[in-house]
Image (tube, helix red, strand yellow):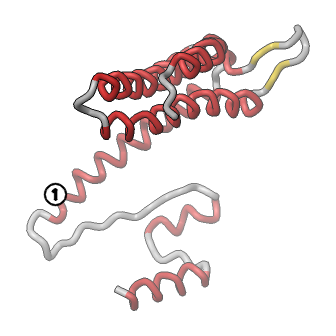
Amino acid sequence: PLDGLLDMSATLAAGVATGDHGAFKPFKIEAVSLMGDRERPGGEDTLAAYGAVVEDLVHVQSNLLERVHQSFFLYLLTSPTTYVPPEDHFVPLGLALAALVLRALTLAPVAVHQFGEAGGLRDLAWAQGLVLLALSLACVAMLNFPRGLFLSFLLAPLALALAPAHP
């Protein structure tokens, strides 16, 4: 294993393409070569199954990227001639959603520790609710970004203020 790792590191350091995907490198096209193990029984069938999964993942990512790239609703207009680009308001949305998830992560250990007690069940319900709220707001933001951003800034602080506190 160490020999293979060192050999791969040397090849990568040299910058020489060694797979079928090497032809795409000069054009800055991300590519990967996958080969099945012919010596194992069903090796080629396994490669076909993995290939289908990889193809589906790339297709989904491509569709999502195209949707985000062509989305006029990601730009928040501050006046008829100026706008706030998406990279300026993705960070606050991410922070608002991350705050919900982090608060859920702080409630979960307390809930597990006090599981038999009423407070433990309440904390577990709050932790699950905060994670579900974060996921729901992220989904709303993907469908209609201004609405998702507004709801996140409205509901995240409210949920965090109402969540149970522990000493």
Residue displayed at 50% across by 21% down: 163
The picture places residue 66, in percent across and down from the top left corner, at: 57, 30
Q: Nearer the viewer, residue 23 or 112?
A: 112
Q: Is residue 56 left or right of residue 50?
A: right
The residue furthest front is: 167
Residue displayed at 55% across by 61% down: 24
Residue displayed at 23% across by 54% down: 48
List the residue tagged with mark 1: 45
Point out the image quarter for the N terminus.
bottom left
The local secondary structure at tag 1 comes to helix
Residue displayed at 8% across by 68% down: 41
Q: Nearer the viewer, residue 127 or 98?
A: 127
The residue furthest left is: 41
Q: Amino acid at mark 1?
A: Asp
Task: Name the image quarter holding residue 125.
Answer: top left
Number of numbered markers: 1
Q: Is residue 77 left or right of residue 7?
A: right
Task: Name the image quarter holding residue 130.
Answer: top left
The picture places residue 116, in percent across and down from the top left corner, at: 22, 31
